[in-house]
Amino acid sequence: MNETANGLASLQGLMGGVLIGLSAVWLMGALGRIAGISGIIGGLMTQRPRGDSAWRMAFLAGLVSGPLLVMAAGGGLGNVAGVPGAVIGEPAGGVPLMLLAGLLVGVGTGLGSGCTSGHGVCGLARLAPRSIAATVTFLVAAIATVYVVRHVMGGGA
Amino acid sequence: MRVPAVKTAAGYFAGLLFGVGLAISGMTDPARVLGFLDVAGAWDPTLMFVLGGAVGTTFVGYRVVFARGTPLFGTHFQLPSKQELDAKLLGGAALFGVGWGLSGYCPGPAIASIGGATLPLLALLAAMVLGWFIAQRLSR
């Protein structure tokens, strides 16, 4: 990839990041809630007070329709690496690897009370010690995993 | 009790903004995420800009919002009160990190990518939901 493409990818990253931040600020300002994806879904899977499910379902519907809106708008606003304009990238492995990864992501974010959005965005913005510790931990674990898969085992994932 | 439609609409709008942000930033592409995590390879800095933009915006925005005292459509801000760093938090985060590093998917981008669903993605989503059930059982 050349430097112009790298710069554009970074700029789009920054723009998209600001939108994610605005989403978190809006959800707190409007409903008083943390914009954590695993927490929002987790709340659908437990007994909650009446009236606590609709906004969660609506958030998820919005989350799914966001990329579809970007696709429909055209103009090549997607930022898939190496595929100009594409919005949704391909999985980096087959079904068995994704089953294992999904299980780890589910159990891990469930036990750890949050993921990249709840801890990584909202928690860091609140300077919450638990979120800072969780974010450092999952970043280090993820970097170590990619290192082992790509540079020790030499796999394709 | 009837849920005011405005709360549902506010939730949808937040999700939409989040999904558009993920799509524009390239976080709906596992290759970008894995490229960021691959510090010993052809490093892709995009995720750093996404996280920087998101945390910076939220840091400033939360202060504005908290200064108002209450949410627009709610009685109070619901913030986690727990402070201690326990094994459950750090162990969970470590397990999540391994899954994230194997796939390049964290929960938000995985769900936001449903519009372009592939069999491996659907497998990941199903296993993730199973994982949440298991975590809730373990936490009980």
Image (cartoon, coloured by chain):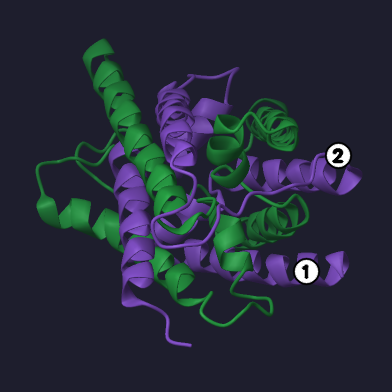
Chain colours: A green, B purple
Query: Is the same chain shared between marks 2 and 1?
Result: yes
How crowded pointer 1 is (Cα within 10 Å; few <14, some 14-19, many 20+) is rated as some
Q: Quadrant of residue A7?
A: top left
Q: Which one is in front, B96 or A3?
A: B96
* A4 displayed left or right of B102: left
Chain to which the residue tagged by mark 1 belongs: B
* Pair 2/1: label in front: 2
Say whether residue A1 is visible: no
Residue B136 shows which numbered tag? 1
* A129 displayed left or right of B28: right
Question: Which residue is at a point 33% across and 22% down the rendered structure image?
Answer: A10
Q: In this view, does A7 lie above or below A71?
A: above
- The residue indicated by pointer 2 is B84
Q: How far apart are marks 2 and 1 (CA)?
A: 20 Å
Chain to which the residue tagged by mark 2 belongs: B
Q: Which one is in front, A140 or B82?
A: B82
Disc 2 residue type (three-letter): Glu
Location of the C terminus of chain B by quadrant is bottom right
Residue A133, how many percent across, how many down?
A: 75, 31
Q: In this view, does B77 lie above or below B54?
A: below
Residue B137, how many percent across, how many down?
A: 83, 72
Question: Which residue is at a point 51% across and 79% down the rendered structure image?
Answer: A51
Which residue is farthest right? B87
Say whether residue B50 is visible: yes
Residue A45, how many percent across, how many down?
A: 64, 75
Residue B87, how many percent across, how many down?
A: 90, 44
